[in-house]
């Protein structure tokens, strides 16, 4: 029975190794006394739960090995006292021990698989098709409910409020919404049970680290006096959100031309001291705009310094403007994320909006004063100069109906959840109106910020602090409800993408789909054919490219068929994004240096 004893020791050694690996993979880092991010607490809680599961699995294996060793010892003792057993009895015992050994091996293999899932190893990298299909199902469920609910509401208007059918339609709407929430709950569970959560987090961190390292290298050339530079003037004639997106555009062009971005911000209308008084500088070593040759866009490759105009007047537009993403990361990004262009823009914001210590302290103090904690939904209500020009009026009821739907769904997972809302607006009366109409909600917000956001006081130091705070806290919420016609709202959504592995579905816009001002065409591709049912619908063939103008949030989108030139409506659920992929300069040398260090 020597071979049995040897296997017992080998299996026992393997258990010990797996236990150590499990502890190394799943043991949470020591908590920081200064950590205020509630997401960290959630991740630590999840890690401890997974560690408990691994401990239980290890205990089961140890029990199998204990029984195994006990029988081996018994056999050895009996063999020594009574001599050789009968052939049949010995064979039966060996067979039984082999079964136990095979069971132990299966449990060890399962433990290996569990450890690999937790560590996000490449063996469990999902296919591009798997991740895209998973997201298409989630989108399809939502689009289907938007269509059904819109049709029922139209039917309700036609039958009239006094019809016998009205109450029945209302019941269908209520129960249909509940059906949809439960289905979305199950889809959410599947995304957690597929074993790929750790891979998604690790892949998101790896991709973000790659881009952040490239941006840092671009902004810190070996010799600034010889570096190729791109000059960007911060003071575009527009508001904060527009100016931030202007800098992002400049940064993307800098990345696409492999030039160090020099941001001219002295005399900034929001802060005369400039960008660096609020945010960390884009470069610590290269801020001199001078050079041996100088020209306006596009210049020549050998021109050292190029001045970039605003995106609205840009001629010879490059292919890499938003909504394009770099080819070298396109497959990884399309696998990971449901809105790759927003993630790409979010990476530039992540680098740009690194806070000065005093700005960070201001936000930390505000979070404590306001009582900002999760779970919480973010609402941004844009009024004043936007309403009637760039956007339609949306009452607080429209926002809060979506908030209520979110919390009703969340109660399926957290029955005792406290309903919190971070409410940001440029109209201070919105906060008091919401508090009066919805007393069962806890509203977090500062009316003083809303007052400083008014047109008359917009370009002040207090206004700048207020808008920075609103964007910051909106981006930290669990779900964002706003109008994407607002640049503040889109910035918060873009920043979200750098906080979560994929926050592409963490929003609901009351008007526009996501877009970037001055973007190149936004196209979708038909997955299935479509024959029009109404005169305002378009015909689709599989593979047709459609330039989308907007989603009507009723099951239909509007756009132009690039093949037929037909303008019209088309069913959103039959489409997929046609991601624009552009060739950017190679950053392989930067990546190689990063991998070596």
Image: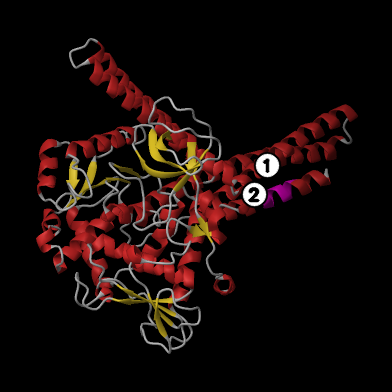
Label 2: which residue? 15
Residue 170 appears left or right of 205: left
Label 1: which residue? 65
Q: Are the residues at dot 1 and dot 2 in contact (C-beta closer than 8 Å)?
A: yes
Between residue 389 and residue 475, name the one nearer to us. 389
Please identify the quarter of the rendering in which residue 129 is found.
Answer: top right
Q: Is residue 40 above or below residue 111?
A: below
**Image quarter of the C terminus:** bottom right
Residue occupying the point 23% across, 9% down:
164
Q: Is residue 523 above or below residue 276?
A: above
Residue 35 in the image: x percent, y percent? 33, 60
Give the residues in magenta: 8-14
Between residue 58 and residue 107, name the one nearer to us. 107
Tell me if residue 113 is in the magenta stretch. Answer: no
Disc number lying in front (1 or 2): 2
**Image quarter of the N terminus:** top right
Residue 257 appears left or right of 129: left
């Amino acid at each position: 029975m020597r071979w049995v004893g040897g296997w017992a020791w080998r299996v026992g050694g393997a258990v010990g190794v797996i236990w150590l690996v499990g502890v190394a993979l799943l043991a949470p880092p020591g908590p920081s006394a200064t950590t205020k991010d509630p997401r960290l607490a959630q991740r630590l809680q999840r890690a401890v739960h997974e560690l408990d599961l691994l401990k239980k699995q290890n205990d089961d294996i140890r029990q199998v090995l204990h029984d195994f060793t006990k029988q081996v010892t018994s056999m050895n003792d009996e063999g020594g006292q009574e001599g050789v057993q009968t052939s049949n009895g010995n064979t039966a015992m060996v067979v039984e021990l082999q079964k136990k050994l095979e069971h132990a091996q299966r449990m060890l293999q399962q433990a290996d698989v569990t450890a690999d899932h937790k560590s996000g190893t490449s063996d469990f990298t999902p296919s591009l098709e798997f991740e895209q299909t998973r997201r298409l199902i989630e989108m399809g469920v939502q689009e289907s409910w938007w269509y059904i609910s819109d049709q029922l509401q139209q039917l309700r208007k036609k039958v009239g409020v006094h019809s016998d059918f009205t109450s029945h339609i209302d019941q269908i709407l209520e129960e249909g919404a509940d059906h949809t929430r439960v289905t979305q709950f199950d889809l959410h569970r599947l995304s957690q049970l597929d074993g790929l959560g750790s891979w998604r987090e690790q892949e998101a961190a790896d991709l973000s680290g790659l881009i952040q390292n490239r941006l840092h290298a671009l902004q810190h050339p070996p010799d600034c006096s010889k570096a190729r530079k791109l000059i960007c003037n911060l003071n575009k004639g527009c508001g904060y959100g527009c100016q931030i997106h202007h800098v992002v555009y400049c940064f993307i062009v800098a990345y696409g031309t492999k030039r160090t971005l020099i941001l001219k911000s002295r005399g900034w209308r929001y802060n005369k001291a400039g960008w660096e008084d609020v945010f960390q500088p884009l470069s610590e070593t290269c801020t001199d705009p001078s050079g041996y040759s100088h020209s306006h866009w596009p210049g020549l490759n050998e021109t050292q310094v190029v001045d970039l105009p605003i995106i609205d007047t840009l001629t010879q537009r490059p292919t890499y403007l938003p909504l394009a993403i770099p080819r070298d990361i396109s497959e990884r990004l399309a696998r990971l994320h449901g809105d790759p262009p927003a993630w790409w823009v979010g990476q530039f914001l992540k680098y740009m909006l690194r806070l000065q210590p005093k700005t960070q302290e201001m936000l930390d103090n505000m979070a404590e004063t306001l009582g900002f904690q999760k779970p919480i939904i973010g609402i941004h209500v844009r009024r004043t100069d936007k309403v009637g020009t760039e956007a339609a009026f949306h009452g607080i009821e429209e926002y809060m109906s979506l908030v209520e739907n979110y919390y009703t769904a969340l109660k399926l997972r957290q029955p005792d959840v406290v309903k919190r809302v971070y409410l940001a607006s440029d109209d201070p009366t919105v906060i008091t109106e919401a508090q009066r109409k919805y007393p069962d909600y806890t509203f977090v917000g500062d009316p003083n910020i809303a007052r400083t956001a008014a047109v008359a006081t917009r370009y002040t130091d207090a206004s700048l602090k207020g808008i920075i705070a609103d964007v910051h806290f909106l981006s930290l919420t669990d779900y964002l409800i706003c109008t994407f016609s607002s640049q503040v709202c889109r910035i918060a959504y873009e920043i979200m993408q750098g906080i979560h592995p994929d926050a592409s579905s963490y929003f609901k816009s009351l008007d526009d789909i996501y877009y970037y001002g001055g973007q190149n065409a936004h196209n979708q591709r038909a997955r299935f054919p479509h024959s029009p049912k109404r005169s305002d619908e378009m015909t689709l063939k599989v593979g047709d490219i459609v330039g989308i103008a907007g989603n009507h949030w009723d099951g239909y989108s509007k756009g132009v068929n690039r093949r037929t030139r037909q303008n019209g409506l088309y069913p959103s659920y039959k489409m997929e994004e046609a991601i624009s992929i552009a060739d950017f300069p190679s950053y392989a040398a930067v990546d190689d240096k990063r991998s070596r260090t």
